[in-house]
């Protein structure tokens, strides 16, 4: 492989103009990358500056959250029993299915919090209560901890390491299925992507199981398998107990609703943000806003930037963190109503052209990301640049 050597005084003396130009380009790229890195800060950097202004109790677990979980569990059991032991009534069953779906999702949000250790500290209790909370979504606590706590949180929006990051054009070129999908017009794709949210969490969970199971030690693998199979066996057992029609309303429709609710948050948490070389939560995360009563029902899951700063803090205290962030870094902080974020997802393509741009390969339109030209009030493609002005990091477009 040829190595390009750029001497410090190469500019005027260098007789090979091509090499000079390449060196200048390389220097500019280094400078740009340097500035980019300089502007980004790790979550620990922000946390160190905000922590002194938060009360000490904010860093203690809040076991009272389990009462909320118990209430949802009672609602779920009552709903399933009502469907199981009453005669079929379409509107009643539909109403119960909606309540069940909302409860499945809320239990998932609580499970997320429990497995971060912000509700109970003891490991076995954390895994037990987290497992119960994630039971409707059938995600095992050991898998979730590995996938979410140890990988997504550590490598948020890292194009290679974050299992939840959306693909880049380079990665996309490896998948035939995704390639065909991106040949559809953006409006059709947007609609399909919205509909797809109703199954995404369940499918992504299975993908994550396939990806991470090899990383567990041989001793731990049987437990991870058990946590995968046990909830699924129970839900399939329910199918045989109550029959397919009742099962549709007692489990399948609620599961689709729960998928949609959790994914409405998860999809907007990072997908409008840039990919980043430094795990900077103010750059790579979005906090969405929802009515206060929704925040109460969903355990403050909307505060995602705050969560990435302090994943070990009960979400009960995230409004305090938000106030501190907005006071210190208002120009860096991203927030918008959940529906606006979903509309932005619907109207923009989901492939990264480079770290800061999304691209629609079909019509060759580029869109910015949050902090890099994406205006959720005016979702328009970026203006085309002349080829000479294109960034060295642009790939296909
Ligand atoms: Zn996240
Ligand atoms: Zn988390």
Image (spheres, grey):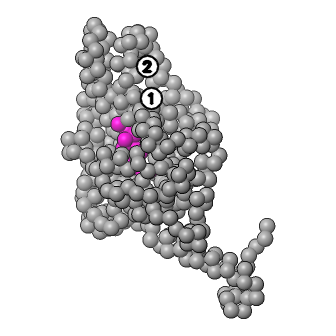
Q: Which contiguous range is marked in magenta? A: 261-271
Per the model, the C-alpha gap separating discs 2 and 1 is 9 Å
Q: Residue at position x 35%, y 47% from top?
A: 343
Q: Residue at position x 45%, y 62% from top?
A: 382
Residues 347 and 242: in front is 347
Q: Residue at position x 44%, y 19% from top?
A: 234
List x then y, in percent, for residue 300: 28, 45
Q: Residue 5 in magenta?
A: no
List x then y, in percent, for residue 365: 50, 56
* Quadrant containing the C terminus in the rendered view: bottom right
Residues 189 and 79: in front is 189
* Quadrant containing the N terminus in the rendered view: bottom right
355 shown above or below 296: below
Extreme residue in the bottom direction: 13
Mark 2 closeness class: few <14, some 14–19, many ≥20 residues within 10 Å: some
Residue 209 location, quadrant: top right
Residue 98 location, quadrant: top left
List x then y, in percent, for residue 338: 31, 47
Q: Is residue 4 left or right of residue 329?
A: right
279 shown above or below 304: below
Tell me the tag on residue 2.
none
At mark 1, the secondary structure is: loop
Residues 318 and 342: in front is 342
What residue is disc 2 on? 235
Q: Is residue 90 left or right of residue 162?
A: left
List x then y, in percent, for residue 282: 38, 61
Prevailing secondary structure of the magenta residues: helix
What residue is disc 1 on? 138
At mark 2, the secondary structure is: helix
Mark 1 closeness class: few <14, some 14–19, many ≥20 residues within 10 Å: many
Q: Residue at position x 49%, y 58% from top?
A: 366
Kindly check if marks 2 and 1 are in contact, taking CB atoms under 8 A apart as contact. Answer: yes
């Amino acid at each position: 492989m040829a190595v390009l050597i750029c001497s410090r005084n190469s500019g005027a003396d260098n007789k090979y103009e091509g090499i000079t130009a390449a060196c200048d380009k390389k220097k500019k790229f280094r400078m740009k990358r340097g500035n980019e890195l300089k502007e980004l800060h790790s979550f620990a950097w922000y946390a160190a500056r905000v922590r002194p202004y938060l009360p000490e109790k904010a860093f203690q677990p809040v076991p009272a959250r389990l009462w909320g979980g118990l209430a949802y569990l009672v609602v779920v059991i009552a709903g399933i029993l009502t469907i199981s032991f009453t005669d079929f009534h379409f509107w009643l069953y539909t109403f119960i299915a909606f309540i069940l779906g909302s409860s499945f999702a809320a239990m998932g949000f609580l499970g997320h919090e429990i497995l971060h250790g912000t509700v109970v500290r003891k490991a076995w209790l954390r895994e037990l209560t987290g497992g119960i909370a994630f039971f409707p979504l059938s995600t095992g606590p050991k898998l979730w901890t590995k996938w979410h706590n140890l990988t997504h949180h550590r490598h948020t929006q890292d194009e290679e390491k974050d299992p939840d990051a959306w693909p880049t054009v380079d990665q996309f070129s490896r998948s035939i299925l995704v390639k065909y999908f991106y040949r559809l017009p953006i409006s059709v794709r947007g609609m399909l992507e919205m509909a797809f949210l109703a199954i995404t969490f369940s499918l992504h969970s299975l993908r994550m199981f396939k990806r991470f199971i090899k990383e567990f030690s041989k001793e731990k693998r049987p437990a991870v398998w058990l946590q995968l199979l046990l909830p699924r066996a129970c839900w399939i057992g329910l199918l045989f107990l109550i029959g397919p029609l009742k099962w549709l309303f007692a489990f399948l429709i609620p599961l689709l609703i729960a998928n949609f609710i959790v994914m409405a948050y998860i999809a907007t948490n990072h997908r409008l943000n840039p990919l980043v070389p430094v795990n900077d939560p103010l750059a790579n995360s979005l906090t969405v806003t929802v009515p206060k009563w929704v925040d109460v029902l969903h355990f403050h899951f909307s505060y995602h930037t705050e969560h990435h700063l302090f994943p070990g803090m009960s979400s009960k205290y995230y409004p305090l963190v938000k106030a501190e962030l907005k006071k210190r870094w208002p120009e860096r902080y991203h927030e918008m109503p959940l529906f606006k974020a979903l509309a932005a997802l619907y109207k923009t393509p989901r492939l990264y052209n480079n770290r800061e741009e999304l691209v629609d390969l079909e019509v060759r339109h580029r869109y910015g990301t949050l902090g890099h030209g994406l205006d959720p009030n005016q979702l328009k493609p970026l203006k085309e640049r002349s080829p000479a002005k294109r960034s060295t990091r642009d790939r296909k477009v």
